[in-house]
Amino acid sequence: MARRSALLAAALLLVGACTPGSTETKDVAPAGQEASGTVDFWHFFTAREAQAIEAAIAEFERAHPKIDVRITAGQDDAKVLQAISTGKGPDVGLSYSTDIVGKFCSSNAWRDLTGYIERDKVDLEQYPETVRSYTSYRDKRCAMPFLADVYGLYYNKKLLADAGFSAPPKTMTELADMAKRLTKRKPDGTIEVAGYVPLLNFYEHTPSHVGPSWDLQWLNDQEKSAVGTDPDWAAMLKWHKDLVDWYGYENLQKFTAGLGDEWSADNAFHKGKIAMSVDGEYRVAFLRDQAPDIDFGTAPVPVPDTALDRHGAGYVTGNIMGISANSDNPEASWALVRYLTTDTKAIVALSNAIKNVPTTRDALASPDLEADPQFKTFLDAFAHPRTATTPPNAAGPKYIELTQEFVNSYLAGPAGDPSAGLAELDKRVDQALELGR
């Protein structure tokens, strides 16, 4: 899942050093040959989720007895790319970031998979258009989708009921009103329970993850910044700034500094310290594992009052798999990638275990897919026509990082119109994108 974006800057420096040469699939073997040998597979999952990966690999090895998969867990993108740049990388890598696909493809750190896909007649129409878009760059497909992450709103049913609410908010006006009424403070203004934390760098509450609700545009067709010319950016920032100022920026900083780690059992939503929070579908499994007493619900992220047609949509990203440029066994590596990204039984089993969204239409329609009401929110969002992702480019997530810096500064500063700052951000992003090409 896409949860470690802070490490992407380091990863980009390393991927820039990857110059393995061409990875065109001219070395693809003829159809019908059985792959064999060893595959080194690195992934980023840990603990409960890593166990699910091990179970899937065991099934793969039973189906492919001539292939031995050596698993290395807990490897982030920076470690994978560093290994590739030194010629010692894994055969297959599983990344948590779709934002880096443009770099993986344009730098040749991962092989072009087109030859394998065409040879084995893999039906890419099994994947929704958004998923296809984040696994290729400029018609070069160097990645396959593993599972997807979709973002929505989590809410504490008891806290909402205690405040007189019987349903989650649908609009931004409702969200702001409920956030204020759900917030509990000490006499000095110190926040004890936050109805909703409006900082756009807290846990999974980021500009990317709320972007589809506001219909935010990041890049235009020429891969230049669109944030300064898209009026929805100013509206989104003003809404958040108004709520930040209601809480008091310093109060929010003090409150969030005292909260538990996002990926531990001390997560603030787990502890009832936050009534509503934006998060991915995987939080369903974390809550049931780490906070079984929390009575929670899930809903789409609220939308502007005049955009109810977008309610139900969400941000989608996901895990991606690729074959390293310096893989010693690309055929067996492709067999593993193909199995984990196209085999319906394997995809459904992994989705049920990890609580990520399946990416193929057959897996989504499988009667074996466990889809209780809390998880179904994200399946519905995944299928919504207005669900979107951030666009790939050769500079990777640099435009997102620069935008995040501006957003943090704006929310921390005095109230005002962000338009001038967004226009200046356009220039900085365009310069960074040009340098990254």
Image: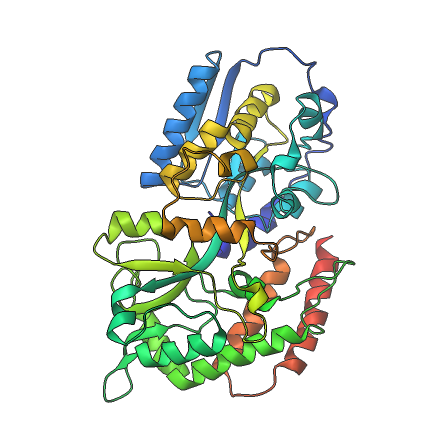
Q: How is the image coloured?
A: rainbow
Res. 282 in view: no
Place of residue 324 in the rendered image (x, y in percent of width and height, measured from the top left):
60, 32
Looking at this view, name the residue that lies furthest to the left.
293
Res. 14 in view: yes
Please say if 226 is above or below 221. below
The answer to which image quadrant residue 31 occupies is top right
Q: Residue at x 46, y 51 (%)?
A: 378
Looking at this view, name the residue that lies furthest to the right.
222
Please say if 267 is above or below 241. above
Place of residue 23 in the rendered image (x, y in percent of width and height, measured from the top left):
71, 31
Task: Give left or right: position of 17 versus 150.
Answer: right
Place of residue 195 in the rendered image (x, y in percent of width and height, measured from the top left):
34, 74
Please say if 262 is above or below 59. below
Task: Give left or right: position of 421 versus 337.
Answer: right
Task: Give left or right: position of 270 versus 279.
Answer: left
Q: Residue at x 70, y 50 (%)?
A: 394
The answer to which image quadrant residue 371 occupies is top left
Q: Residue at x 32, y 74 (%)?
A: 194
Q: Which residue is at the front of the view, 140 or 157?
A: 157
Q: Residue at x 73, y 64 (%)?
A: 431
The answer to which image quadrant residue 198 occupies is bottom left
